Image (tube, grey):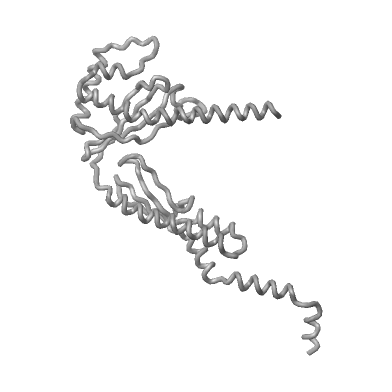
């Protein structure tokens, strides 16, 4: 039994430290990407080469690499100009059963948004976990005109309103004397349908049969391209509200108490009248 506890403790400690290292590295991916792309834009190709991690036995041809960097330079400048903004989107490690789609061991895949305040794109990079050098770099096939974020933030007020309403209903249900409260909690948390969502890049979307779990809202903040806000119509919360407003649980409780306290034989007296 002690051995099992020690093994579980060791696994937990290893997992925690691995998670901390992953998070720490994540904060460096944006700055590394910014340094690398800016070096391409400034035609500092030797600096680009110094930021790349090559296999141990590889002997890359620097002239070939510089020619590839020159092509990237032309592509970036023609689409975005030479002054870019950078927004970290996400990083991930993927493990599959057949290893065909797995992230290479000791590496992390990262996505970073680039934009010039008018047009937006995305780059995908693979980083070595130990050296934080780049092992691969791709410019994604994404090139979209940026619009205003005003509607996104205004829509966020509605999302917060739905979240606040569902939390309020949970508090009201907890304070009530309603029986089987767990049913009401499930309704509030799970029954949020249909769904209205907003994507900065494509606008509003309505899904009639799409449920929003976890208090009726969902969101993702991952740059202009991938961000979204969504809320489900709080149908479960409204049902609970209706039941609390139209049912007098206290009176029912008092009636039950009075019936249980009726003296023995009282019914016989009434029958004899």
Q: Is residue 66 above or below residue 89?
A: above
Return the x and y of residue 189 as percentages of the image width and height: 51, 54
Residue 55, position in %: x, y?
38, 14
Q: Is residue 44 above or below residue 5?
A: above
Residue drawn at (81%, 80%) of the image: 265
Residue 39's image quarter?
Answer: top left
Quadrant in which the N terminus appears: top right
- Would residue 210 be found to the left or right of residue 39 on screen? right
Residue 69 appears anywhere in the view: yes
The answer to whether residue 108 is left or right of residue 16 is left
Residue drawn at point x = 27 percent, y = 50 percent: 150
The spot of residue 184 in percent (x, y) is 55, 59
The image shows residue 71 at horizontal and vertical percentages of: 22, 23
- In front of the other: 202 or 258: 258
Q: Is residue 53 left or right of residue 117?
A: right
Against 134, is 149 above or below? below
Which residue: 34% across, 23% down? 136
Of the 4 image quadrants, the one containing the C terminus is: bottom right
């Amino acid at each position: 039994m002690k051995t099992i506890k020690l093994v579980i403790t060791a696994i937990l400690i290893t997992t925690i430290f691995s998670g901390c290292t992953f998070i720490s590295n994540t904060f460096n991916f944006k700055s590394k990407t910014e340094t690398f792309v800016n070096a391409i834009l400034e035609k500092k190709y030797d600096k680009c080469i110094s930021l790349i991690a090559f296999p141990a036995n590889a002997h890359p041809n620097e002239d070939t690499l510089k020619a590839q960097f020159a092509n990237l330079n032309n592509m970036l400048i023609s689409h975005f100009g030479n002054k870019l903004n950078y927004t970290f989107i996400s990083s991930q490690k993927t493990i599959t059963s057949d290893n065909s789609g797995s992230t290479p061991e000791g590496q992390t895949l990262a996505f970073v948004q680039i934009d010039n305040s008018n047009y937006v794109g995305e780059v995908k990079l693979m980083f070595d976990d130990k050296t934080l050098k780049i092992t691969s770099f791709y410019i994604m096939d994404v090139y979209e005109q940026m619009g205003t974020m005003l509607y996104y933030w205004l829509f966020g007020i509605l999302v917060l309103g739905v979240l606040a309403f569902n939390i309020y209903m949970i508090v009201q249900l907890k304070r009530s004397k309603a029986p089987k409260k767990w049913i009401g909690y499930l309704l509030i948390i799970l029954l949020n349908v249909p769904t209205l969502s907003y994507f900065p890049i494509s606008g509003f979307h309505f899904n009639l049969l799409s449920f929003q779990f976890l208090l009726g809202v969902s969101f993702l903040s991952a740059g202009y391209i991938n961000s979204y806000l969504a809320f489900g119509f709080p149908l479960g919360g409204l049902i609970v509200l209706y039941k609390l407003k139209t049912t007098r649980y206290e009176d029912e409780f008092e009636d039950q108490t009075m019936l249980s306290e009726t003296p023995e034989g009282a019914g016989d007296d009434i029958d004899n009248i």
